[in-house]
Image (cartoon, grey):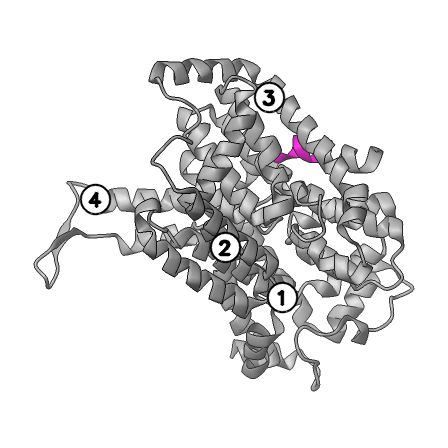
């Protein structure tokens, strides 16, 4: 009934998904809103796709509440003690609450867009037809980036790679006496800048792991926890702009606009370095009294901040696994080679298991699922993003891209900007700078953010609050805006 009603609102002949932007009517003389209205009239499914996308965003902000409900349901289920059930093998296991687990799933940020992608599939099947929606999700969407993020997150979280990163950070932190504050500064300044070499997903994974072990372990205040994750997300978002191959929003335009690493560093990289350093130092000065208390806690625990001295790992194993990371980065756009290299890594990890740690593939897979679903939704938002971007001047385009990035992956923003004909150099710079500046405001604003949240969320009561993250990221975002707009 509902699919039939939805299909009845469409014209008899509708282009394949996503509808090419050049097939829409020319921009209306009535302005932006009239243009958007014309595009909805030309293809009413645009409105449905954007409504579902908006509902997914609202659901993302509501995930902490779902987790609270899940905890309450499970608490009622376990009143009087945990229930036990006996399996066919004779093993006794705890009985779970089905309702509680469903609410937990609805409260998983990484699962939200996937759930709404199912709704999108069903609504789209009613509007466009089942074949068209399956063809869009199977062939019209490029899943290269989600696959790459999943693999690089798994590779970057291995013990040899993190050990190397820890030693580099340790050398930098040693300049400040290996205190909690020195390690915090080293991780948040130099860790994100590594993203220009090992890509932003790799930098996010390594920096989040190091923060978990060398900072969050000492249980800072909730305000400082949020300040740190907000700063991390913003720094990583701009930290990949020293080269032209590391940041997803940069990758989307460098080929089309013929930008190389020298050009990118000259126009973005040095500004990113100034912004990262300034924002991190400002947060450090603001929380300096708490860092002093955390240092007392560290000394009382008799625990060194650096953990680079653990079990010995032969240098050739570290070199080999760095080689796997380099291979993944070099062939990040060639999915068969990327997957093949990962399979070889799994064999290598098994052969050197006594120098590895257990590979937990669930977090990378969940992040990949999140990004894949985000790409599915984002690919259908071009109908309104393109005219919005085209209607803005340099300053308004910068702030518009910063704002829009909060509700869509910044790589999608720059990709759509690359489709705008005759976009001037100043506007190109503005949209890319705005997209990377706003990449830390929400978990969906930048592709690596879900990886960082997945690693750090258990340090926060009921997980990372989207509102708390946004508030914490506002300060660094404004600093980055100043670095890109004023210099």
Question: Which type of secondary structure does the marked residue at label 3 adopt?
Answer: helix
* Mark 4 / mark 1, whichever is N-terminal: 1
Chief secondary structure of the magenta portion: helix
Q: What whole-number distance in Å separates the C-alpha atoms at marks 2 and 4?
A: 46 Å
Q: Earlier in the sequence, mark 3 or mark 2?
A: 3
Who's the residue at 44% across and 57% down the image?
Answer: 365
From the top left corner, tell me how far across and down residue 151 is, in percent: 49, 57
Please report the residue visible at 67 percent of the width from the left and 72 percent of the height from the top. Answer: 18
Q: Judge from the rendering whether residue 420 lies leftward or rightward of residue 10; answer left or right.
A: right
Q: Is residue 454 left or right of residue 26?
A: left
**Circle 3 residues within 10 Å: few <14, some 14–19, many ≥20:** many
Residue placed furthest toward the bottom: 12
CA separation in Å, label 1 and label 2: 39 Å
Q: Residue at x 39, y 54 (%)?
A: 362
- Nearer the observer, disc 1 or disc 2? 2
Q: Which residue is mark 1?
A: 49
Distance (Cα) linking label 4 and label 1: 41 Å
Q: Quadrant of the rendered structure where residue 334 is?
A: bottom right
Mark toward the start of the polypeptide (2 vs 4):
4
Residue 96: x and y in percent read: 24, 52
| Side (left or right) of 258 relative to 167 | right
From which residue to which does the magenta span run? 473-479
Which residue in the protein does label 3 denote? 284
Residue 48 percent across, percent down from the top left: 63, 67
Towards the viewer: 169 or 59: 169
Cα separation, mark 4 vs mark 3, equals 43 Å
Return the residue at label 2.
Answer: 324
What residue would you read off at disc 4?
Answer: 78
**Earlier-in-chain disc, 4 versus 3:** 4
- Cα distance in 3D space between marks 3 and 2: 35 Å
- The reply to whether residue 391 is visible in this rendering is yes
């Amino acid at each position: 009934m509902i699919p039939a009603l939805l299909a009845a609102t469409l014209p008899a002949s509708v282009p394949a998904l996503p509808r090419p932007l050049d097939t829409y009517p020319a921009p209306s003389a009535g302005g932006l809103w009239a243009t958007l209205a014309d595009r909805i009239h030309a293809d009413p499914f645009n409105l449905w796709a954007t409504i579902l996308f908006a509902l997914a965003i609202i659901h993302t902000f509501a995930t902490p509440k779902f987790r609270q409900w899940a905890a309450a349901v499970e608490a009622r289920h376990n009143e009087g003690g945990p229930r036990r059930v006996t399996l066919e093998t004779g093993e006794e296991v705890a009985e779970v609450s089905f309702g509680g687990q469903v609410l937990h799933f609805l409260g998983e940020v990484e699962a939200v867009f996937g759930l709404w992608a199912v709704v999108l599939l069903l609504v789209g099947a009613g509007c466009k037809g089942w074949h068209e929606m399956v063809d869009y999700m199977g062939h019209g969407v490029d899943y290269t980036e989600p696959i790459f993020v999943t693999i690089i997150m798994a590779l970057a979280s291995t013990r040899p790679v993190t050990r190397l990163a820890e030693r580099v950070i340790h050398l930098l932190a040693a300049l400040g006496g290996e205190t909690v504050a020195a390690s915090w500064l080293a991780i948040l300044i130099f860790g994100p800048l590594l993203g220009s070499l090992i890509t932003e997903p790799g930098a996010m994974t390594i920096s989040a792991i190091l923060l978990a072990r060398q900072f969050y372990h000492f249980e800072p205040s909730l305000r400082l926890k949020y300040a740190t994750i907000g700063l991390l997300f913003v720094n990583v978002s701009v930290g990949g702009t020293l080269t032209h191959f590391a940041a997803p929003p940069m990758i989307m335009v460098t080929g089309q606009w013929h930008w190389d690493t020298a050009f990118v560093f000259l126009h973005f990289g040095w500004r990113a370095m100034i912004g990262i350093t300034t924002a991190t130092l400002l947060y450090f000065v603001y929380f300096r009294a708490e860092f002093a208390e955390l240092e007392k806690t560290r000394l009382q625990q008799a625990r060194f901040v650096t953990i680079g001295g653990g079990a010995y790992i032969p240098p050739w194993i570290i070199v080999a696994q760095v080689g796997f990371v380099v291979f993944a980065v070099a062939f990040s756009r060639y999915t068969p080679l990327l997957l093949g290299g990962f399979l070889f890594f799994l064999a290598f990890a098994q052969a050197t298991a006594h120098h590895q740690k257990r590979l937990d593939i669930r977090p990378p897979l969940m992040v990949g699922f999140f990004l894949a679903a985000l790409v599915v939704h984002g690919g259908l938002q071009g109908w309104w993003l393109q005219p919005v971007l085209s209607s803005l001047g340099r300053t308004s385009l910068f702030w518009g891209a910063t704002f829009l990035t909060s509700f869509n992956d910044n790589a999608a923003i720059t990709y759509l900007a690359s489709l705008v004909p005759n976009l001037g150099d100043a506007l190109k710079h503005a949209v890319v700078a705005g997209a990377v500046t706003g990449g830390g405001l929400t978990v969906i604003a930048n592709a690596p953010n879900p990886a960082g949240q997945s690693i750090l969320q258990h340090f926060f009561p009921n997980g990372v609050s989207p509102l708390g993250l946004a508030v914490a990221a506002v300060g660094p975002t404004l600093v980055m805006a100043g670095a890109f707009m004023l210099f």
